[in-house]
Every structure is written in C-alpha cells, then in structure tokens.
Image (cartoon, rainbow, N blue to C red):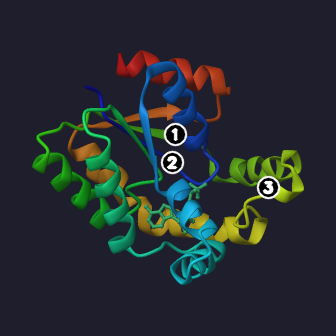
Amino acid sequence: MTNIIILGPPGSGKGTQSKILVEKQNFFQISTGDLLRKTVESGTEEGNKIQKIMESGELVSDEMVIEMILVEMSTNNSKKFIFDGFPRNIAQAKALDSAFEDKSMILDFVLLLDVKLDFLENRIKSRIAESDPSNIRKDDNVETLSKRLNVYKKITYPIIDFYEKKNKLVRINGMDSIEDVTNKIIQIIN
Ligand code: ADP
C-alpha cells in the first residue's frame, strides 16, 4: 500500500496532480485545504473563523488540521493515501509520523513539486482568469498569494529538509506540463 505526500508552494499543482492520481491510481486524497473549505461552507462560527484565516493567507491551527487528518485516516482505513497541503510545518509532520506509527503504516514518498516562486504569480493569475467568477477561491489573489508564499518559505520550507533526512524526498520539476508531471510521479511511485 503506497502512501505519499505531495508538497510544494501554493499554485504548484498539488491539488491538480492529487486529483489525477485519485482517478488513475486509485489513491484516496486527503486535502486539508479542501476539508477546511468544506467547513467554511458549513457557515458555522468555526467555519467563519477559518474563512478569515484562509483569506489572510495564514495557517489555521495545528490542532484543527491534525484532528481532521486523524479522522480522515481512521474513517478511510486500508486505502492508499495522498496527502495534499498537509503537513505544512514541522509540528504537523511529526504528528503525521506518529499517526503512521500508531497505525503501522509506512510513508513511501514525499514528492516535492519544485516551481520557481516568480512562476507562481502568473499561474495564480491565470487560475483566476480561467475560473468561473462565482467560483474563484477567496485566497486566490495577488496580495494573499504573496502572504501564502511567505508562509510557505518561512514555515513550510523546513519540512523539505525534515523529509530529505529521512530519505523520503523526491524532487519533481513542477514547471513541466501537467501530463509530464503526472507521468513522472507514476514512474516514481510504481
Ligand atoms: P495552496 O496550497 O494553494 O495554498 P490549500 O488549499 O492547500 O492551497 O490551502 C489554502 C489555505 O488553507 C492555506 O493558505 C491555509 O490558510 C489553510 N490550510 C490548508 N492546509 C493547512 C494546514 N495543513 N495547516 C494549516 N492551514 C492550512
């Protein structure tokens, strides 16, 4: 059973590739961003709080996302997981390590979608341009993107080193075409 993390800056294609891997390789996707957006849609007080944090480009609390991950893992036992957008800092990476250990599961690969940071602004701009106006993510705008990129550089970056030391990290050129990136991933994990 292969379990992978897909890692990369905002706009690097994690969500796109994860969804393709669900289709083509039968993975179960655990995306904290998607789970949080669902909570926001619920319109509860908690959802409203999360919405504000997401729109600011900051991270929501570790406690909340770790709880979400644990629930998803437990309710989808014996599936092969692709983690998308999680972990995003060292505390989350350690919590995931413990969850794997508790469940006697193995993390096989951490796939880093390497994308030059100046490339991302253009990607997000075209994502906005191509989206149905009623469907644009509230955090997809140039101001929030620069905040999200700063959070990535400061807070998420150290987990690259964390997984490199565990010999789990594989770098993939995220500036290649969607299809080329998918093919590369499939080649690595199989
Ligand atoms: P992207 O990777 O393009 O930034 P996501 O959908 O993964 O988009 O995340 C959107 C927002 O959701 C983040 O900016 C953050 O506020 C919140 N978020 C997602 N995953 C996490 C996480 N693991 N920990 C804390 N906050 C998260």
Q: Are marks 3 and 2 in contact (CB under 8 Å)?
A: no
**What label sits on residue 145 in the rendered view?**
none
Comparing 16 with 144, the one in front is 16
Query: Which residue is found at the position 64% from the left and 21% from the top?
Result: 179
Q: According to the image, label 3 marks what residue?
A: 135
Left or right of 134 on screen, residue 15: left
Sequence-wise first label, 3 or 2? 2
Q: Marks 3 and 2: which is nearer the front?
A: 3
- SS label for mark 3: helix
Q: Are marks 2 and 1 in contact (CB under 8 Å)?
A: yes
Sequence-wise first label, 2 or 1? 2
- In space, the residues marked 1 and 3 are separated at their CA atoms by 25 Å
- In space, the residues marked 2 and 1 are separated at their CA atoms by 5 Å
Q: According to the image, label 2 marks what residue?
A: 8
Q: Amino acid at mark 1?
A: Leu
Comparing 19 with 152, the one in front is 19
Comparing 124 with 62, the one in front is 62
- SS label for mark 1: strand
List x then y, in percent, for residue 152: 51, 62
Left or right of 104 on screen, residue 4: right
Comparing 160 with 47, the one in front is 47
Q: Quadrant of the C terminus?
A: top left
Q: According to the image, label 1 marks what residue?
A: 113
Q: Against 156, is 97 above or below?
A: above
Q: Amino acid at mark 3?
A: Asn
Q: Amino acid at mark 2?
A: Gly
Local packing at callout 3 (Cα closer than 10 Å; few below 14, some 14-19, many 20+) is few
Local packing at callout 2 (Cα closer than 10 Å; few below 14, some 14-19, many 20+) is many
